Structures are given as structure tokens and as C-alpha cells.
Image: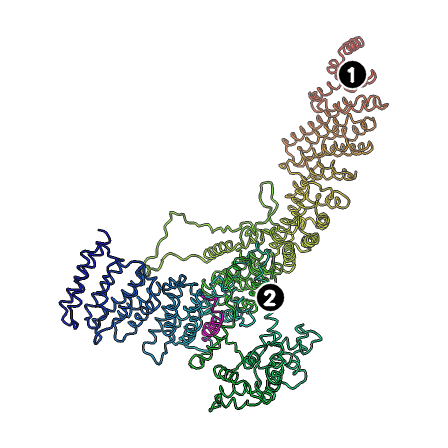
Amino acid sequence: MNNRVKTINCVKGEIHNLLAIMRFVPDFTASPEIYIAEFKSLFQSLLVCSDVDSLDFWSPFLKIIQSTEVAGPIVGVALSSIHKFLLYGFLSPTSGFILNNIVNSVVQWNIPGLYSSNDEVIFMKLLQVFLECLRTQASIYLTDASVWSIVKRCFDVFDKERVSELLKKTAQNTLLQIFIVIFNRTAEMGNEECYGVPCVRNILLKLANLIGTNEKNEANWKEKRCLGLFLMNTALETAGEAMGLHEGIVLIIQDEVCKSLLINSNTGDLFILSLTLRVVFNLFQSIKRHLKVQLEVFFNSIHLKIASEYEDSQDPFVYQRSELALESIVDFCREPSLVLELYTNYDCDLHFANLFEALSKFLCKHAFPLHQNLIRLNELCLQGLLAITSTISIRCDPEMHNIEPEPLENKIKENKVMKEKYSESAYIFNNHPKDFIVKLQEKNYLPKNCDAEAVAKFLKENPAIDSTSLGEYLGKPGEFNQEVLRHYLKFFDYGGMRIDLALRLTFTSLKAPGEPQCIDRILDAFGKVYFQQNPEFADETASYVLAFSIIMLNTDLHSCAVINKMSIESYMRNVKGVNGGKDFPQEMLIEIYNSIKNEPIQVSETVNVVKSEDLADNDLANNTWKKIIKRTKGSMNYRMLNELMLQPAGENEKDMLDILWESGILGTLTNAMDCAGEEKSLKAIKELFIEISKICTYFNMTDHINRLLSTLCQCFLRNTDSIIAFHHSKRALYALEAAVECAIACKDHLNGVWGHLINCLFRLHSLKLLPQQLIDLDDFVDKEGRILPMSNPVLDDSFFQYFRAGSKVSNPPSHKSEDDTVEESSGLWASFAMYLGVPTQPAKRGDELMQELTQELREKVIGTGIHQIFLNTKSLPLESLNYLLRTLIQRCKDSNEEVNIVLSLELLTNSILSNAIRLEVSEWKSAIAHLVNVVTSTHHSWSTERGLVCLLRLCIHHHDDIVDLKASLVTVLEHMAELPPKKLSRYADRLAAGILILMNSGNTSFLIQGSSWTLLLKILNSFSLIERTAMTGFEIVSLIIHHLHEWPGVELKMYEELLDLIIVYIRQDLPSSGRISLGLKLVHSLHKQILKRNTSEVVIYFWKKILALVGRLCQEQKQALRLQAYTLLQEIILTSSSHPDLEKWPLWKECFERVLFPLVVEPFMITREMLKDISDEKATIMKKEFEMCREKAMDIICYAVLFKIKTLNTASEFTTFWVRLLKLLSQTLKNKESGDVNEKSYEMLKNLLLVLKTDNDLNQEQWTLTWEIINLDALRHEIEPETASQQHIDDTIEVL
């Protein structure tokens, strides 16, 4: 079905319905034939109609509605038909004429006769038609009169007496939808073809009238006010900023609407006040650009005034009013641009009050808790402060800090500076009128040699000058005062201005004094200046007299004391003939009279707050509002700062923070945190601290940061005397979180705060709540990787374990397995407890609960991130880092708690190591000197041990870079060297480990030079006496010997001392340590170094010394030592046999006689104690060891002889040496008891003699002596078989 057919059928159906009801309604007073005939004609036209749009099918229905004689039910059907046609879209989008005709017809309908409840149905249909007329596409062609008639008719329905609540709600809902439709088109208004500004103006005037409905004089005043406020909110929310596009609309809002809202704020109904506050907020959102003066009045007269009423009253109603006002203030504060715009438009404008400052002071004052707990109003003020600081903070981006400020920002700053200058100088003048010039000169507000003109210029240009004080000063008879007055008046431009207007201009900022003489002086000077600029009068006297008459006329017409007012005729008679004997122009006098009559001459009064009593009096309210409107016309628009909001924060934001700070925000937050109990409030306070700290950081406000963080730290300390106190105090954790986040945000400005942060650290430390990252001690370990134990076992088992365990809390072992069941309580109590839901399981022990609390709190502390502050010191500026180091040093000196001192030392050392490259020399020296003082303290403690570790750590990493580290280590070694062994043992293991690592790090030649070596040698000797450090000390000796060749200029004495030191360690060795073997290798290594790098005398000296030392070791009672010493002795002899400095006979003679031969004679000493009560088995073993050692000695002697025989046999004493050697060797050939030949000795001697025989190293005489001493035929037969046979024959012959 096409649209034409659909339209025709629908209209036919409605005609049928209407005709049917017309026939059967009994009270149809008019003649029905006329209407029936018209509908039948329309019906016939529809049957043959091809173009529905050209057919006027609306008129018959509208005639029914317009008729005053048609019964209500019939009108209702006609309205339903019109509504259906509009719904179906039968009205063409361009049919503006028809739509306006529909509106006019429907609006004119009135109830014929008396009102009845049945008529409400018609009213509802009426409302439906109105709404649909505005919704149709042709509504753009509705005239302003049509739209206003619709709105007015809807209001009439709402206001109608005796209507039901349903109809009222329907009318209200219809108005709501109509307002949405109308105000949604506000931005498009201006087209002459459709409705627009005139209609909206009428609507706003109607709303203003509703809002200002008098409570006493009108019925249903509350209902009307609520409707007006509700619709005004709808209009503002719908139109938004488009409201400000039309001057006509703005003027209505500035005047009537705002006046009604101001009066309405004095209401005693909370719901109406709530709606009023919301309208004010929406006004600010929509057209604040045009409401600069009004918003100032609203803030001062409504928001701040009502919000503070609760202070002087205990009435709950007053409290609720204050709460509503505060909620509205918070809504304002949450607007992103409000903070800066308030400051810019008011605090930086000479002609407005410091609104941002007033708001800041108000919030800070009322957020301050007056009781032990925060009340709702305190919390609201905190939310407002948080919104303000967040708005400032969000633009405090450090990355944008160096961006060049916008010209507008500089201009705002200049205005603020100028306002402060004017305000201060005006204060001086207003309060010190006698000596204000001197005071202004002291502040450079006036030049040193100022004259009357300079003073007059100052008074003229300063808008903050009090008009009363100014009038009194200028009216004084003094010569200087009168000169200032003349110059002051000359600054006015009266040219071409009528004299009454000139007087108005003059007295705008100058209030005429009460004394007639003063007024006379001012008017006399005015007359002269006016005449100079307007010489239209006869002379100066004429100007003066006319001016005086105008002032008198003003008083007469507007004074309440004057009953009979002066007429125009009387006034003209009074000034007759005073213009140089002539009359003033009559037209001018009439204009002056009418001007004064219509508006009095008075000082321009700046109204920024309206009192409640003024609002209660209509005349006072109207008079006050006129002043506000007058001020509005002379004020600049509200400055929008949307573009500036995209720029980084500048000097203006800094000034805003200063205002907040001077308003006492820190004291407010401090007390609020002490009183807050709810997490919501604590969270808001924490966020406030953080936001303020970010702003302070951005603007480098170090003092503010110090006070913020010190406040938070002190709050934390006040609430954490124990684990229980910490657990029960929510504010303690929030204070700690805030302090940590503020410190992280302000890491570049923590100079004066480190002490407070460290105090918090100490408190957490004392409660064993520190994160593991802070309590992990960097300590030396043993070979198995275990941390070296403390010298004090009690301390090691108690608090020191907390350091090493970190956050691990070990639960006490349980004697029950997981499978064990807990026997539940039985009996009457058990049944009763189960019934009540009381657990019958045994309660946890106190220590278990404490462990759980500690673990829970430690996790929360870790969550704060406090460890990040002290571990990430690389990102700190150098100055802040220096303050941290100095504070840690001072805390070490001041603290009496051992654990705190140790913690400070650890943090100090870690911070230095993390920032070693960029630290200044002075900081290094301070830290090193402190560590040295700690270590060299006469009182041994845990801190001295840790101080030693810390100093060694620094030396290990940076002894090459920092000269003072070397000197400090020498000082510590000197101190340690003087300690008795028992005291030294407390430090020995860590000192030894540190020196060992230091030696491994290289470039430690400073330790083996001069007095340093003497100290180190003494300490190394002491290490050998301490069981747990002996091996480490031995490793140090080994490293020294290993690197000895790298250090030039080593004294010869050092070699000798090292040899003695090695021997000491060897003799102190335990069987299981393996130190003997290593020690003997060191001796050999040292021997090799001596052979390579020193002169012959030195080589010979140390060769003798080493041989003597090793020889004595071969005679030691320890078997392992003896055996390895023999091996070393053999190696030394072999390696030195070819050295050119060791070829001489005397050296080797001494070697044999003093070292080797004694080994054969007495391999090791056997004392009487050794033989006392010895068993046969042990005696046999000892005897075997004795013989075995002799064999080893004999073996070495044989090797030595073979290697050096060429040197030996050339000596003149060789025969004697050889004989002695043979005699010693022969002692090992036969067993004294059995007489048996020792096979090993026999073989060694045999080999020696074979080699000597082969090389002809012995002459005949020497061989003869050999066989005589040896006296072994078998051996001789093997060495000299021929000679032995011949000898045998000779012996046989001799026998025979």
C-alpha cells in the first residue's frame, strides 16, 4: 500500500469515528449539520483525490477543536485524529503554515462550561499534540509565538487548579520533552524562518519567574520552584555552550535567571537548594564565559556562605544545607579547567575578589577536623582539595618543563603581580593615610622624589583604593592635598561630556566626604578642571555652582529624609542667572534633572557577596542586583583557557600552590590523617600528599617537600610503636605508602628528608618488617659458600638471623602429622558452642598469631616499595645522594641501636658502590673516615665487624681509584695488628677473606711496601694461630709469592720473612688441610724466584737459608711433613745444581755438612717423652720410620754427589769429604742388631759408585779408601770385578 492510499484510508477512518460520536453525544450544543456536511464533503473529495498534499483535510478537525460549543468528547476525538496524522507523518516537511494553524487552533481550546475530571483526558491529548507538533519535521517553521504558546499552554495545564496528580505529572513530563526538543536546537537558532531567541527568552523569563516564586504569597510555591529548577537544568544540559551564542539569551540568564537563583538560595527547603545548586553548576558549565560577575556572587553568597553555616549552629538542617553546598563545591573543583580559570579570572583580575584563594582557604579550614574523627564535611573538603591539586598536578609533566610559556600565561602572571602590587599599596593608603607616601617609597611603589602629580597618578590608577579614604584625603585643606586633588581631576577626560556625566565619572571611585567643607573643596577643584576642558560656561565659578547644585539635587531626590522632592521648576529657579549672570540652557538643565532623577550619582560599589537579609527584602535585593548587573556590563567576559590547559604548568600554577600552602593545607592534612579512620578518607589524604609532592617537585620547592615528607614520616612513627599498634592503625600504612610515593616522585629533592625516611626504616627494622632486599648483607663466605658466622654466637642466633633469613618466617615444628585428627570438645559446652556457631577448635598461640601478623605486615611494607628508594640511588641527583650519605653517617654516630648502625653501614656502602664513579672526593673521604672510626673503635661490637666488611668491600672495588682507601686500609691493619689474638680472632675470618679478595683483584703492591708490609706480616702471623683463618691467611701468602715477581723494588728482607712465614703456617698445619704440600711448593717457588732475579750474594744467602729451613723440616716429628720436605729438598738441590752462582765447593761442602749429613745421623728427634710408655708395635713403627728417613737422606746425598761431583772432586778437601761421606753411608748398609745388609742402601751406594767408576771421578787412593771403609766384597766385585779377583788371589797367597 502506497503512502497516498494509506493517508486517504486513515483520514476516512477518522472521519467515520468523528461522525459516529457526533451523532450519539447528547450534549452537542451546536448544530451538527454544519460539521457533518463538511466532513462528508471531505470524504467525497478523498474518493477522487489524486494528490493528498493539495487537499486540506486538517481544517474540519481543527474547526471542531476551535469551536466553543462542541462537547469535550468530540474535541477529544478530533485531537486524537490530529495526533494520529502527525504521528503518521501526513504533514509535509514544508507545511509550516498548516503546522502553525494546528498550534493556534489547539492552543485556543478552552473547556466549555465547568471543569470536570473527564476534561483531563482532553488535556492529556492536548499535550500529546503539542509535543508531536514540535517533533515533526515541519517544526522548524513554527513561529516564536507558536512555540511560546505551546510552552505557556503546558504551564497553564500544570498550574490549573483542581487537576489530578496524574495530569500534573503528564504536563511536567511533556514540558521536559518539549524543552529537550527546543533547546536541542539552540545552536541552530538565528534563522528568521523558524523559532529562535525570542521564544527561548520568553521561556527563560517564565522559568525565572517560577524559580523566584514567593513562598508566602503563592500556593504550590514548592511545586512551581521545583518544576522551574528542574526544567532549567534540562535546558542547560540540553543546550550546553550553545546558550552563550545568543546575546538575547545571555542577557536574560545574566539578569532574571541568576537573580532568581540567588534569591532561591535563601530557601529553607533542602530539595530546592539541591536543585538550585545544580542549576548554578550547569550555568557554569554552559555559559560561564558570560557570567563572570554572577559566578563570583554565587560562590561567595551561596556556596561558601552556606557551606560554612554549620560552624555556628547545632541544627541538623543547617548541617545538611552545608553538606549540599560543599558537594556542589566539590563538583566545581572536579571540573578540569575550573582551578586555573578561577585563579586567572578572579585572583589575577584587579576588579574581582581572589576567588581561588578564598576557595582554598575555605577548603583547608573546613577540612581541618575539630573532633577526634572526620565528619562528612571534612571528607568533602578533602575531596575538593584533591580535585584542585590533581588538576594542577596533571600538567606538571617534567618532560615538558622547559617548553617556552605561552604569551597568555605571561600576561596572566603580569596581572597577578600587578594586582598584588595594587592591593598592598592600597592597603597601606587605606590604613595609613598620614604617612602612606613614605611607606610606599620604602616598597618602591612611589619614586623617592615624588611630587603631587605622582601621588595623584597612583591614586587614580589603583582600583583597590578605598573610595571613602580617597575622598577624605582629597578633601583635606592641606596645600599638598589640594595639589594632589587638582592633578587627580586632570587625569579625567571631561572633554565634550555633560557636567552631570562628568560628576558621575568622578564620583565612581571617589566618595564625597561627609563634611561640607571637604565637598566644597572637591567641587571647587572639579569646576576649574571641567571648565578648562569644556569652556562652554561663563567662567569657573559657573561650573562650580552648577556642579554643587547637581550634588544638592542628587541628595534631595534620593534621600529618604527629604519628603517633598524638588521639582524641575524649582531646580531651574535655583540655578537661574549663575552662569555669569545668565541662565544655563534649559534643555541641558532638563536633561540633567531627568538623569539624576532616574539614577542617582553614587560610588560604583563592587558587590561580590549578597547577605541573606538583603535577599529577604525585595527592595534591597533589587537594588543590590542592579549593582551587580551594572558591574556585569563594565566587566570583561570570563576567560576560557582550554588551549592553555594543554600546555605544561607554569608560574601561575606555582602561585596557586603557594596559595594552598599559605592556606594551611599541610596542617589540615596532618590533622586529617591523625583523625581519619575510614580507608576512603585515608586514601584521599594519601593521594593529596602525592599530588602536592609532584607539584612541589615540578617547581623545585624543596622546603615544601621536606615538610610534606617529614609530616608523613612522623605520622608513621607515631602509630607504629609495636607490631600490634601497626596492625591496628590503618593510617600508619597509608602514611608509609604516601611517604614512599612522595619520595619517589621527589627523588631529586630529598636533601633534607633522608633523616626522616631513615627513621622510618629504623622503625621497620626494629619491628623486623623490612623487605629482604634491604636486609640482605653482603658478607664473605667460606669454601662451602656459607656466610661467615658472627663472633658473638648469641647475636648470630637472634637478630642476625633476621638479616640472613629475609622475609622468611619459620614456623615452629609441629609434633602432629597432617593425618592426625584433632579431637573436638565434647559435652554440654561443645553442643552449645556448635549450636551458636562458635568454633570449638583450640585457639592459636600468641607466637603463631604474632608471626602471622608480622608476615602480613611485611608483605604490605614490601608493597609500599620503600626498598626502591634506597636501592635505586643511581637515579638520584648528586646533591641528594651526598645528603643521603651524610645522613647515614650521622645516623651511625647518633644511634645507640646496633641493628640500626649496621643497617646504616650497609646502606652507606651500597650507595657508595652504586655511585662510585660520580661521587666527589670529599664524600669519599667522609665515608672512609667514618668506616675507619667504626672499625678502630675500642669497643667490639657487631657494627665494628660490619664496618670492617664495608670498608673491605670499598677497598676491593675501588682501591685503585681512591687514594684514601689505601690509607684507610693501612690504618685498619695497624689497628688489627695491635690487637691481642683473642680480640683479633673476632675479626680475623672477615679480615682474612677481604685481604684475600683484595690481593686477587690485583694492584695491591701498597700492602707489601714499607710499614704496610710489616703490619700485614704481623697479621698473617696471627692468622696462622687462629684455626678458622689459617687457611685463608696461607692463601694470602701464596698470592703474595705468586705476584711477587710483578712488584718491583721488593726488599730482600721480605723474602726471608716470607720464608719464615711459610714455615710457620706449615708447622701449624692440620693433617687434613693439605697446607704442608702447598707450603713446601711455595718455598720451592720462592727459591726459583730468588734464583732468577737477584745477585749472586743474595742467591747464595737464600739458598743456604732455604736448605737449612727445609733440612730442619725433614727432621720434624710429623711424618707427612718430613716426607714432603725430603722431596722438596731433593728438588731444590737438583734445580740449583746448575746455577752458576752455586758451583763453588765451599757452598756444597756446607750443604752436605750442615744439611744433608745431619739427616743421616739423626733423621728426626726422638725425645724421652716419645719413648715413654711406648708399645713394642709403635716402637717398631718408629724404628722403621727412622731408617726410612735415613734412606731418603742417603738417596738425596747420592744424587747431590752425582750432580756436583765435578765441583766436589776438584776441591783439595774432597778426599776428607769423601771419607766422611762413606762413613755415614756405611752406617745404613748393615743392621746393627742382625748384621744384615740393607738392600736399599746397598743399591744406592752401588749406583753411586758405578757412576763414579764409569766417569773416573775418583783416583786410586780414593777408591782404596772407599773399599777399606765399605768393606763389602760383593759390592766391590760388582764395581771392580777384575781388581776384586786379583785381590782375592793375593789374599789367598798371603794366607797360604
Snapshot quadrant of residue 1247: top right
Is residue 293 shown in magenta?
yes
Mark 1 surroundings within 10 Å by alpha-carbon count, few (fewer than 14), some (14 through 19), many (20 or more): few
Looking at the rendering, the stretch of residues picked out in magenta corresponds to 286-309
Q: Residue at x 54, y 82 (%)?
A: 500
Q: Where is 552 relative to 265, above or below?
A: below
**Marks 1,2: beta carbons within 8 A:** no
Residue 956 at least partly seen: yes
Q: Where is 165 relative to 819, above or below?
A: below
Which residue matches tag 1? 1255
Main SS of the magenta segment?
Answer: helix
Q: Position of residue 1024 (x, y in %)?
A: 68, 42
Which residue matches tag 2? 414
Q: Where is 208 relative to 57, above or below?
A: below
The kind of residue on which mark 2 rests is Glu
Identify which residue, 313 or 105, lies in the foreground: 105
